[in-house]
Image (tube, rainbow, N blue to C red):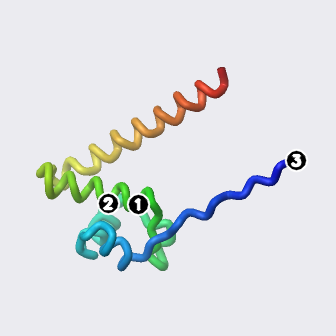
Amino acid sequence: MKAYLMKKEKRYTLREVVEVLEVQSTVITQCIQKEWISPVDPESSEFDQEDLARLQLINELREKVGVNDEAIPIIMHLIDQIHCLHQEIRKKGQDI
């Protein structure tokens, strides 16, 4: 029997996210309050790669594309649905 090791995903502090994405901490706080992202560990405000990707997309939609805050949750929900469908398709492909 093989033992599979799960690779521990890197987590980022709020300060690291601010530096990596070059966004203000207030933007990140606002995204958390609006429930567009949720830190892996809310108490220590640790974020994972998925959070960083979502934050980067939200920031680009707002700053570069000009999407308003009312449209952000709709867009993020649609992206989440596409991601889930993609995973289902891949899973069904493996079952064949």
What residue is shown at x 40% (from left), y 43% (from top)? 80
For marks 1 and 3 on the same chain, the one whose residue lies earlier in the sequence: 3
Task: Give the alpha-carbon distance from disc 2 to disc 1, as whole Å.
Answer: 6 Å
Quadrant containing the C terminus is top right
Vertical position of residue 78 compared to residue 47: above or below: above
Residue 40 x, y percent position in the rendering: 50, 66
What residue is shown at x 11% (from left), y 51% (from top)? 66
Q: Is the residue under label 3 in contact with that under label 2 (CB below 8 Å)?
A: no
Q: Is the residue under label 1 in contact with that under label 2 (CB below 8 Å)?
A: yes
Q: Is the residue under label 3 in contact with that under label 1 (CB below 8 Å)?
A: no
What residue is shown at x 14% (from left), y 49% (from top)? 65
- Pick the residue in front: 65 or 29: 65
Q: What kind of residue is marked 1?
A: Asp
Q: Nearer the viewer, mark 2 or mark 3?
A: 3
Residue 74 x, y percent position in the rendering: 27, 44
Q: What kind of residue is marked 3?
A: Met
**Pointer 3: what residue?**
1
Task: Give the alpha-carbon distance from disc 1 to disc 3, as whole Å.
Answer: 34 Å
**Pointer 2: what residue?**
55
For marks 2 and 3 on the same chain, the one whose residue lies earlier in the sequence: 3
Residue 20 x, y percent position in the rendering: 33, 69
Q: Nearer the viewer, mark 1 or mark 3?
A: 3
| Number of the label disc, if any, that sits on residue 33 | none
Q: Left or right? Give the position of 21 relative to 42.
A: left
Vertical position of residue 18 compared to residue 76: above or below: below
Q: Left or right? Give the position of 52 relative to 2.
A: left
Q: Residue furthest top?
A: 96
**Pointer 1: what residue?**
51
Please rate how many residues cluster around mark 1, counting C-alpha atoms within 10 Å: few if below 14, some from 14 to 19, many from 20.
many
Q: Left or right? Give the position of 48 relative to 6.
A: left
Residue 16 x, y percent position in the rendering: 38, 75
